[in-house]
Amino acid sequence: MKCDECGKREATFHSIKKINGVTTERHLCSECQKKYGGSLMKMSGLGNLFGGLGSFFDEPRLSARNEYICPSCGTTGDEFLRTGFVGCSNCYKEFAPIIMPVIRRMQGDVSHVGKVPLGVENSVSMEYDRLKKELEKAIELEEYEQAGIIRDRMRQLKGESSDERKL
Amino acid sequence: MNGNYNDVVVTSRVRLARNADGLPYPYKLNDDRALLLAKKVCDAVNKRSSEPSDVENGDADYALYRMESINDIDGEVLREKHLISADLLENKKYGAAIINGSETVSVMVGEEDHIREQCILQGFDLHGAYHKINAVDDDISKAIKFAYDAKLGYLTSCPTNIGTGMRASAMMFLPGLGITRNLEQCVGAVARLNMTIRGVYGEGSEADGYLYQISNQKTLGVSEQEILGSVQASIGHIADAELHAREQLFKENSVAMKDRIFRSYGVLCNAYTLDSKEFMKLFAMVKLGVFYELLKVSDSQRFEKLVTDAQPANILNLSGKQLGEEERDVFRAAYVSKTLKSICKR
């Protein structure tokens, strides 16, 4: 089997991960493994996320994770790290210091820009949606400079509210 | 040889994960509120029975399946059709599925999240699947307030689904890449695009029937349209590679390929006993034979349906009897032979 990265050398490193019903396979030669090994988890999304969370925290915080207990459903921070599941919506608020690094690692440091439930207002999502339509129009009209400006604004919007996290 | 993406993409599926606001998530929910939730979702979906578009498509009849009372075979039949998950089957207490008449829309209550809404359409039609499930989602949201946060989007049991809660996927038939051993390379390329690829019936390049599922990994910081676009683009790349591999395969190994295809057809038409693994292997070759126009199919819907029909629970269901493993394999051989002889000819 050839290496997934260089496609030339024989793969000597094989990784098959099945988490939450999602399987990802990686086959790398020793050189590419050295080169890309560190970013393997990023490429395979969830790989090792719940098994090796130690790397996310320094020791004091790691030992303190049991101090997180959700008053709404009784789930503990440790339980979340072990299983990968929260017990209720409130857990996202209660476990914010431990859950946000996990989300950032999985999904990137970004905000929701998709659908908003009927009757709910989300100015970021709505603005993003509006810009997306503008972008499509600019591309259609071959106004690439304008498209670039819109794209930058969309990128900014995704990350912009990441510092204003208020749950 | 034609080379349409529909020769590669078997089905397109869009799934949305939702939770009810103020209720513990399924793993922590053990009281009567769960039953109430199931009832509310059923009522909301049943209201769709009066939707003109659904009536027109013959989709107005939604059936409710309670995991508490469904028998083992019926449950497995739905699972093999990808209409419910194994996790839902285990939720005997209040797990339920609401499925429309054409079996394109399925809403599961009490899976990993309170509500999992999905639409599966034949062929390459991710936008069509999203359009349909989005309407169902709007209807359910009128009856149930979803757990939602302005920054994190729809809140889910596992943070892998947070944001849009959306997984767009396609089941792809990849014998060209599988036989030429190019699938591994494709898996690597797909992983770099933040997509996941896995065997539908088994894992790796030996996945039964060369059937693979490709889906998005990221659900937060991307809009539904962007997810559809990126999955569609990835499917396009893989489908191009697959069609190219099929062409090369036939060009370079014409005699060997024809022999393999006709032998597979011969066995499927004449075997006395057939297990599902052997069926998947041989049927993939027959399907490839249809693509190469070596075999002609008169009823493509029935032909495609054979894959599900031949699965263990579905074949038992079709027999209408309680059969042991050996008798089931004999029945499968007869069923496949009869069907193929009537709709697939040389």
Image (cartoon, coloured by chain):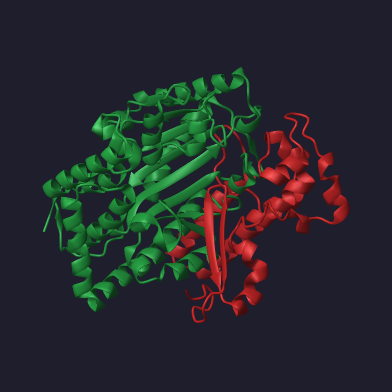
Chain colours: A red, B green
| Vertical comparison of A48 with B97: above or below | below
Q: How many marks?
A: 0
Q: Can residue B240 be spotted in the picture?
A: no
Can you name the residue that lies furthest to the bottom here? A8
Q: Position of residue B191 (x, y in %)?
A: 53, 63
For image coordinates 20% across by 65% down, the residue present is B292
Front residue (pair B112, A72): B112
Q: Can residue B45 be spotted in the picture?
A: yes
Left or right for B33, reference B170: right
Q: Position of residue B5 (x, y in %)?
A: 31, 60
Query: In which quadrant will I find the N terminus of chain B?
Result: bottom left
For image coordinates 51% across by 23% down, the residue present is B38
| Vertical comparison of B295 with A11: above or below | above
Q: Position of residue B83 (x, y in %)?
A: 40, 37
For image coordinates 37% across by 66% down, the residue present is B178
For image coordinates 45% across by 33% down, the residue present is B107
Front residue (pair B140, B33): B33
